[in-house]
Amino acid sequence: MATPHSASKGPEALWAAPVATGPVSATVRLPGSKSVTNRALLLAALADAPSLVRLALRSRDADLMVAALRSLGAEMTSSEESASSVDWAITPRPVRGGVSIDVGLAGTVMRFVPAVAALADGPVLFDGDPAARKRPMGPILGALRALGASVDNDALPFTVRGPISGGEVVLDASVSSQMVSGLLLAGARFDKGVTVRHSGPPVPSMPHIEMTVHMLRQAGVEVDDSRADVWRVEPGPIRARDVDVEPDLSNAAPFLAGALVTGGTVVVPGWPEETTQGGDQLRHLLERMGATVTRVPEGLQVTGSGQVRGIEADLHDVSELTPTIAALAALAGGPSRISGVAHIRGHETDRITALATEINRLGGDARETDDGLEIHPRPLSGGVFHSYDDHRMATAGAVIGLAVPGVQVENIATTGKTLPEFPDMWAAMLDGPR
Ligand SMILES: O=C(O)C1=C[C@@H](OP(=O)(O)O)[C@@H](O)[C@H](O)C1
Ligand SMILES: C=C(OP(=O)(O)O)C(=O)O
């Protein structure tokens, strides 16, 4: 059975980031998408019959989703397990209350599961890591209240008490697209369905809402997203369907960046022809930074020239790629400006401050702006790269370490949030063709 991976190994754990001794040449198989896995598991647990979620990610965030859904009553049996992948057979059961749920630091658990808990017959307590208590929750908890649930706080820890009747709600989702996804995913099970209206600055990470809508429609749920910033989910059954989870394209980012930094080639098998994963934007972003990107029969191939070009990029839609793009920018030959990502101050850590601090600690020139970073070329030297319990900070440190001797990434185990095999996969990429 999958069990939650540990949150961290403490600040004293330093990982000597390997320096590339030449161009990498590797095929890197990524396990399943965190975002697809956690949506598929949740929809299966609320469906009208048993189903399979195949090639699901095994990682801390996915394990926390499994534990949460089991606590709420779903039956889940695993097979075909490897270190980072598992097939789940899921039998939905009536949602039960009187339980506590650990969300860890997983946005998909803290923002998606409360609406499920609002279907339960008793109270459900939510709590998580100390850093999770700082992540924005107000808009979705306020929305659940407006839809009929009682919620006793505006941040973690909180208790949700149903029943929820559903209906129409207005919220400000400019802090996270997950505020919308979290209401839509369970919305078909509310008596009146749900209509969510966003009011405020633009919603970030829109591909993730498109992923939610797409997966709901695949499950036979009627969703109207024809008006900007309004989503309507009709009440009705969520149809059971077997799902194969796509590889995690956002987790491909550091490996593909490795091709760019070292002037080598990395192939990611199984890159989908069509996808709602925002990580697909890497094809364009890495090309703009100097890579040659081609589809080959095995998947997506990225080849670097050894020169990284600076970039001006609005990453509002694909903000989870910011740490990798910032790491590349720190190694680039020209200046970069990343904009549109003010909300990532509320991700696993304040990623804008964390990236500027850690790049500058190595001697770089990174400046925070209101909604992103300006990064200018400056030679870097070795030192400790702090990860702030943030998986994507840790992998950003690994990317810089490919080109800068002496980088030590603090708490590399934090990559277990979405990619527990990261250190081994990184070593294998550097070991050469396979
Ligand atoms: O719904 C999802 O699966 C996600 C949505 C995005 O969150 P934000 O909208 O908070 O950026 C993304 O950054 C996160 O990694 C996963
Ligand atoms: C922002 C992220 O995660 P979460 O799902 O916890 O919001 C991320 O993985 O980059």
Image (spheres, rainbow, N blue to C red):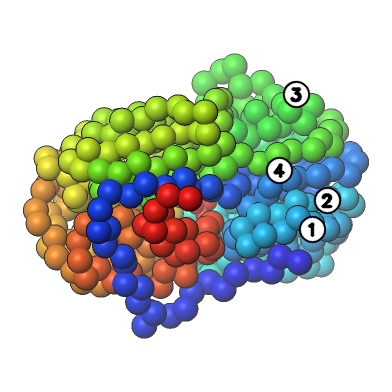
Q: Considering only vertical position in the picture, is 53 above or below 72?
A: above
Residue 89, labelled with which disc? 2
Left or right: residue 375 versus residue 413 is left
Q: Nearer the viewer, residue 337 or 136?
A: 337
Secondary structure state at the residue bearing disc 3: loop
What x and y, as percent, mark residue 269?
Answer: 53, 39
What x and y, as percent, mark residue 350?
Answer: 35, 58
Left or right: residue 93 versus residue 20 is right
Q: Are marks 2 and 1 in contact (CB under 8 Å)?
A: yes
Q: Which residue is mark 1?
A: 78
**What separation in Å lies between label 3 and label 1 (alpha carbons)?**
30 Å
| Residue type at the position of mark 2 | Ala
What x and y, as percent, mark residue 99?
Answer: 78, 67
| Residue type at the position of mark 1 | Ser
Residue 40, labelled with which disc? 4
Q: Are marks 3 and 4 in contact (CB under 8 Å)?
A: no
Q: Nearer the viewer, residue 217 or 280?
A: 280
